[in-house]
Amino acid sequence: MAFDPTKPVEGSEIDAAELRNQFNALQAQITALRQQVAALAPVLTANNTTMSLDWIYGGPACDGFHIFVHQPNDAPGTFNDRVQVACGLRTRTTGFDSPADAAGYAYYIVPMDGDENPLTPPSNTVSFGAPPPPGDFQGQLDAQQATIDSRQSQLNNVVLQSGDNAAAITALQAAVAALQGNH
């Protein structure tokens, strides 16, 4: 059943089935929006060779990215907004010389608009680690390309379904605001 904003009618008796259908329809819409918005989040990787953070982003135009950092002495799950970078950048060096130097650090990024509002959910969380065994790079590249292809397909579906990019971005920003408490 689709959500019907005219129900319940003013002054009508409470009907549990009618309300349940309304709530279920709203939950279905929220779930669908969460899936669409999540597809726009940046994909972050920790490059053990260059000791940099690299990311792919296909979401709405942004003014920059905020990089959140968990340091070894921080309480578990605590991330602090440490660095802001321009929207055109897709990499950021960390200043560490090796993965061992970066032990205990973790990162995620969030694209922001000009008013410092997040445009999508946060990226995945990454940390530096031991380099993969030799010969395993092709598998990593294939997995990363599959993630990119999936995110691009989901982004295309959001834009195609909306027909109106401005309305789609507004709807996605509203959905992101609603999801912010879930990270």
Image: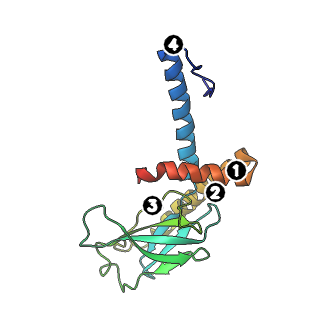
Residue located beneath label 2 in the image: 152
Instruction: Estimate how packed mark 3 is, as few (under 14), some (14 to 19) or many (20 or more) residues with alpha carbons within 10 Å.
Output: some
Which residue is located at x 56 percent, y 67 percent?
A: 115
Give how far apart the Cα atoms at labels 3 and 2 are.
16 Å
Q: Nearer the viewer, mark 2 or mark 1?
A: 1
Q: Farthest residue toward the front? A: 11
Residue located beneath label 1 in the image: 167
Q: Earlier in the sequence, mark 4 or mark 1?
A: 4
Q: Secondary structure at mark 4?
A: loop
Amino acid type at image mark 4: Glu
Give how far apart the Cα atoms at labels 4 and 2 are.
47 Å
Q: In x, y percent, where is residue 45?
A: 47, 69
Which mark, residue 13?
4
Residue 39 located left or right of residue 124 = right
Residue located beneath label 3 in the image: 124
> Where's the C terminus, which quadrant?
bottom left
Amino acid type at image mark 2: Gln
Give how far apart the Cα atoms at labels 1 and 3 are.
26 Å
Q: Earlier in the sequence, mark 1 or mark 3?
A: 3
Q: Earlier in the sequence, mark 4 or mark 3?
A: 4
Q: Nearer the viewer, mark 4 or mark 1?
A: 4
Q: Secondary structure at mark 2?
A: helix
Q: Secondary structure at mark 3?
A: loop
Q: Nearer the viewer, mark 4 or mark 3?
A: 4
Give how far apart the Cα atoms at labels 4 and 3 are.
47 Å
